[in-house]
Amino acid sequence: MVRNIVVLGGSSHPTLTDTICEILGIQQGSALFSKFSVGETRVEIGESVRGKDVYIIQSGGGKVNDHFIELLIAISACKTASAKKVTAVLPLFPYSRQSDIPYNKTEAPLVKASNLSNKLVADSNGYTFDSIPPTPHPDRGESHGLTNSNAHLLHKVASRSQLDEVEHSPTHQARFNHYRDSSTHSSTKSDYFAGSRKRGDSFTSMTNGITSHDFAAKVDPQDSFKPRPGYRQWVAQAGTLVADLLTCAGADHIITMDLHDPQYQGFFDIPVDNLYGRPLLKKYIQHNIPDYKNGVVVSPDAGGAKRATAIADSLGIEFALIHKERRPTKITDRQNATMMLVGDVSGRVAILIDDLADTSNTITRAAKLLKKEGASKVYALVTHGVLSGDAIDRINASALDKVIVTNTVDQRDHSRRCPKLEVLEVGHVFAEAIRRVHYGESISVLFQYD
Ligand SMILES: O=P(O)(O)OC[C@H]1O[C@@H](O)[C@H](O)[C@@H]1O
């Protein structure tokens, strides 16, 4: 039993708090989270936290803004009630995709939300959500700008040097130069759009200021937001604000898992422990995917390549990458994005790895492409199963055979609605991190997964 510690659970994920307390052998701290009729959050701490080491568990996902405010008020309440130290435990860190200028996912969603229910109808292959335009296929002469010299890579296993070859080939560079300004040469998703945002008004009017793909899933911002002609919209970078709010509220320490951008830790001036979900994902692959040694780990986009290659390397299996090409040909052509596979999955199990599935557009579209390219089965392994809006319907109707998520976000409702979903428990990882932080022990052992 861990002593002199108080663990409180916000309303985002009560079962995870229960699991953590059970593993630590303690009773959950007493706190009441409620609402005034107007919607304001009310927090009451029901026991003394004076001189105690307090851990407040609150995840992103669900009613993310309400949960975040609840957390801030709870932190502040504990500090003013003389807690010695307050640690915010955020299994999924809210707003962590907004640590930089939010990227604009011009290729998603594939349909307008207003038409979504009509579109959830399987095509002749039994899957929904066609790429528009179709995924390029060399046999059909749809090389989409690939030269003969690098088109052959589409049918080969992508080695690291081959990926570099594509990335650095003059043709590729030429194609992407217009997405970059002279000072922006990183290939991350954010940077593509950080660069393109600076291109000027044509891009501004093309995107019409869409700043969040979550938002895009609900309403079509084109209908509601038009930046004034000649003005480049100002895109909020909420990451810094969120980090500041936590520290201002009184947080002394943050524990989280698989931050979308690990560099986000640098936005804090308090310690941040960013735990890894990879050991769990790796173990799942080893124990549950038959013949995984002949499988291929696939990153659904360039931004996740590092994450996916780390798992592929540690399993000693091959790696492939889905390259999303955003090359609108006219101002209104927001959905003109194509996906192409760099690597070979033909006759093999494809194992998609990503940090997060929100609308699930990314993994369902990737699965469709992988099946078209001959994958025998497609698994998606994702740390954070946010699965908001129509995500579950989308997964159920997709080419995905299985979706594996951890329970950094509450999965009880998702599991009921999605027969393809399997959930991996993270309670023991957070319990061990809390125990080690409380006793001042190193937590680096939790980062090892080889
Ligand atoms: O396509 P959905 O599921 O909405 O969003 C998930 C994607 O958005 C990115 O931030 C994640 O890394 C992932 O690739």
Image (cartoon, rainbow, N blue to C red):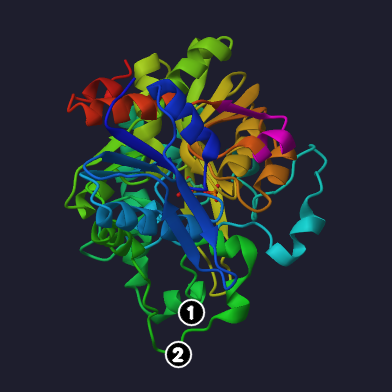
Instruction: Please state which amino acid type lies under the numbered disc 1.
Output: Ser
Quadrant, the C terminus: top left
Sequence-first disc among 1 and 2? 1
Q: Are marks 1 and 2 in contact (CB under 8 Å)?
A: yes
Q: Can the viewer see residue 275 in this picture?
A: yes
- Give the residues drawn in magenta, as a range: 413-423
Q: Which mark is residue 308?
A: none
Q: Position of residue 265 (x, y in %)?
A: 24, 47
Q: Quadrant of residue 80?
A: bottom left
On the image, which quarter does residue 74 sit in? bottom left
The answer to whether residue 142 is seen in the rendering is: no
Provide residue 308's location: percent of width, then percent of height: 40, 31
Res 400 → quadrant = top right
Residue shown at the point (53%, 75%) measured from the top left = 331
Residue highlighted by disc 1:
205
- The residue that disc 2 covers is 229
Q: Compared with residue 397, is residue 215 higher up or lower down, i.e. above or below?
A: below
Q: Amino acid at mark 2?
A: Pro
Secondary element type, mark 1:
helix
Q: Is mark 2 within 8 Å of ligand 1?
A: no
Q: Real-space Cα distance between discs 1 and 2?
A: 8 Å
The secondary element bearing badge 2 is classed as: loop
